[in-house]
Image (cartoon, rainbow, N blue to C red):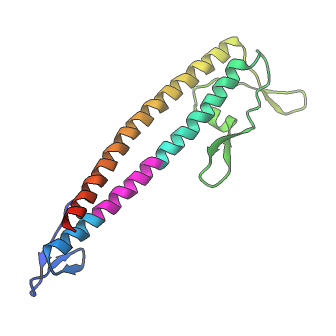
């Protein structure tokens, strides 16, 4: 955070278009602005972690489903998961399945002209392996996000302590 401070002809400090009579008031304003920026970062990180957790839960549900399903059983991928869409509503398991990209396409047209989702033993094992890999990746990202969140919380505490010391 780079800060440009000037002094006007009255000897007041000028920062960010505002004037401050003394260094204490100036430092307080800068600290509060810095704390607001840290708070925004904390909220963004928390939202990202919530998205990861929702996706992990949905992938876990899908994994449990795959493990317990019988070979050639029709998957009900049209069901909604617990992963919210940005515009409202929830992603279906089919949308999550497709986002993973590498999973086998298990579609087949049924006798009524609709689409069923089947798998054989090999496809199911491949899908389980890919789901586990995606979940491991998300867990790693979540751990990194937690470390970053702790760092942001520490920064916020330091700024808060500095403000408390001024008061």
Q: Residue furthest bottom?
A: 10
Q: Position of residue 62 (x, y in %)?
A: 66, 28
At 70% across and 12% down in the image, what residue appears?
Answer: 121
Picture quadrant where residue 83 is located: top right
At 79% across and 24% down in the image, what residue appears?
Answer: 74
Picture quadrant where residue 150 is located: top left
Please indicate, yes or no, whether residue 81 appears anywhere in the rendered image. Answer: yes
Tell me which secondary structure the magenta stretch mostly adopts. helix
Q: Is residue 18 left or right of residue 54?
A: left
At 64% across and 32% down in the image, what residue appears?
Answer: 97
Q: Is residue 154 left or right of residue 72?
A: left
The span picked out in magenta is 33-46
Magenta span includes 37: yes
Q: Is residue 39 left or right of residue 113?
A: left
Q: Position of residue 3 (x, y in %)?
A: 19, 65
Q: Residue furthest top?
A: 121
Judge whether 95 appears above or below 87 on screen.
Answer: above
- The residue closer to the viewer here, 165 or 100, is 165
Magenta span includes 116: no
Position of the N terminus, as image quadrant, is bottom left
Picture quadrant where residue 72 is located: top right
């Amino acid at each position: 955070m780079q800060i440009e401070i000037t002094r006007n002809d009255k000897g007041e400090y000028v920062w960010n278009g505002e004037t401050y009579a003394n260094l204490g008031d100036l430092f307080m304003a800068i600290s509060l602005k810095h704390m607001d920026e840290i708070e925004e970062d904390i909220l963004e990180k928390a939202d990202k972690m919530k998205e990861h957790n929702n996706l992990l839960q949905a992938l876990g549900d899908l994994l449990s489903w795959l493990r317990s399903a019988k070979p050639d059983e029709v998957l009900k991928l049209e069901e909604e998961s617990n992963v919210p869409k940005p515009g409202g509503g929830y992603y279906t398991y089919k949308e999550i399945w497709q986002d993973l990209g590498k999973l086998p396409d298990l579609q087949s047209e049924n006798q009524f002209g609709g689409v069923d989702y089947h798998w054989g033993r090999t496809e199911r094992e491949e899908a389980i392996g890919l789901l586990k890999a995606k979940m491991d990746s998300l867990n790693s990202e979540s751990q990194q996000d937690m470390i970053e969140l702790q760092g942001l919380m520490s920064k916020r505490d330091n700024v808060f302590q500095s403000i408390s010391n001024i008061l």
